Image (cartoon, grey):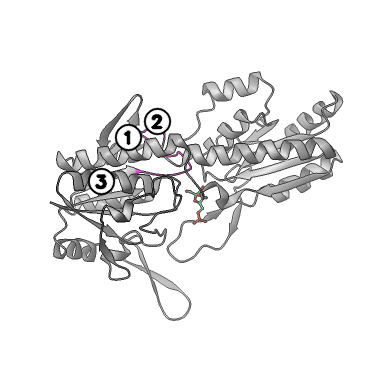
Amino acid sequence: MRIALSTGGGDAPGLNAVIRAAVLSALDRGWEVLGIKRGYYGLLGEDDVVPMTRDMVSGIGHLGGTILRTTNRGNPFAYPVPNGDGTYREVDRSEEVVANSKALGIDAIITIGGDGSLSIAQRLVEKGMKMVAVPKTIDNDVSGTITTFGFDTAVTTAIEAIDKLHTTAESHDRVMVLEVMGRDAGFIALHSGVAASADVVLIPEIPFDVDVVVKKIRSRDLAGRRFSIVVVAEGAVPIGGEESIMGPSMPGQAKRMGGIAGPLARMLQEKTGKESRSMVLGHLQRGGQPTGYDRLLATRFGGEAVRAVAEGKWGHMVALHSPNIVTIPIVEALREVKRVDPKHDIVLTARATGISFGD
Ligand code: F6P
């Protein structure tokens, strides 16, 4: 048996722990393991496919990033090819992935990625490839699993940032606006904001009215709390407004979201008369060591993925259904998008403890 591993999309802390667990579990069964570099690039002649040894995965479980590297510009079904005039066209190179994988004698692929990688995996399964998926994203927006690895680390990083902003905001009587990642999902903002006692949490699932935020800041002032912490998800939208886009993406990349914190802080300063500053936490949320929770979850996912391969569960994804790791069809995970439920207990408790969602 010869299996291959691939990591695709944005990186997330815990990828190396999945790789380590999958490689060791597969070697333990006497299988051969290959590593496809940078998503599917290795199968498109754009990068390498390398044999994975015990030595290569030794001591990597606690490291951020991915030793296989990754890309979010390598969808083989919509591969960006330059036209030579600065524009790009999308070309379907999926047949090359199928053919090269066959030529390398790969019996099955374990793909580790977010919603984009899961859709690609499903389409490759429909072309006859034997694939098992491991869900990954700091955004926690993959359905069918209680959580994805990387999320806990991102939330922990955001909490540390909010804790630090608290002390400086309080010293200066300032409003501090912290922008966190998450694309169209508000999980990172909600979990970190509530855990670190923010005053305002703005998420895409609950459009906000800036005047309601102003009112909250003023009422804190009146109560002698002369500083406020606003946590805003990069995908948060004002009522009747649009999400912020950070700027142009590279060819083949999804829209680059973010940039709401600066204009929001300026607006709050204008309307409240209080000094307001902004900070974008950005890729710090994706880097560094995974938390213990993420390392364990990633390790469990890696081990289960190999068991799923052994059982021939093609087109399945490993998932956390606490307290167990299970497998579910990838199509089930793709059926619906996962977003914060505005009626979720975390939202209800946040409101009950005085956090404003700006609505
Ligand atoms: O999906 C993970 C994520 O970190 C999002 O939260 C964020 O919008 C995006 O990736 C950023 O991607 P990139 O690193 O390609 O700009």
| Up-down relation of residue 359 to residue 6 (above or below) | above
Farthest top residue in view: 352
> Which residues lie in the magenta part?
135-147
Q: Nearer the viewer, residue 48 or 356?
A: 48
Labelled disc at residue 24: 3
Q: Earlier in the sequence, mark 2 or mark 3?
A: 3
Q: Earlier in the sequence, mark 1 or mark 2?
A: 2
| Cβ of mark 3 under 8 A from ligand 1 | no
Q: What is the quadrant of the C terminus in the image?
A: top right
Residue type at mark 1 is Ala
Q: Which residue is mark 2?
A: 146
Q: Nearer the viewer, residue 234 or 38?
A: 38
| Up-down relation of residue 285 to residue 350 (above or below) | below
Q: Are marks 1 and 2 in contact (CB under 8 Å)?
A: yes
Asked if residue 139 is among those painted magenta in the image, a careful observer would answer yes
Farthest bottom residue in view: 84
| Up-down relation of residue 18 to residue 9 (above or below) | above
Residue type at mark 3 is Leu
SS assignment for the magenta stretch, majority: loop
Across and down, in percent, residue 230 comes to: 70, 37
Residue sitting at 61 percent across and 47 percent down? 242
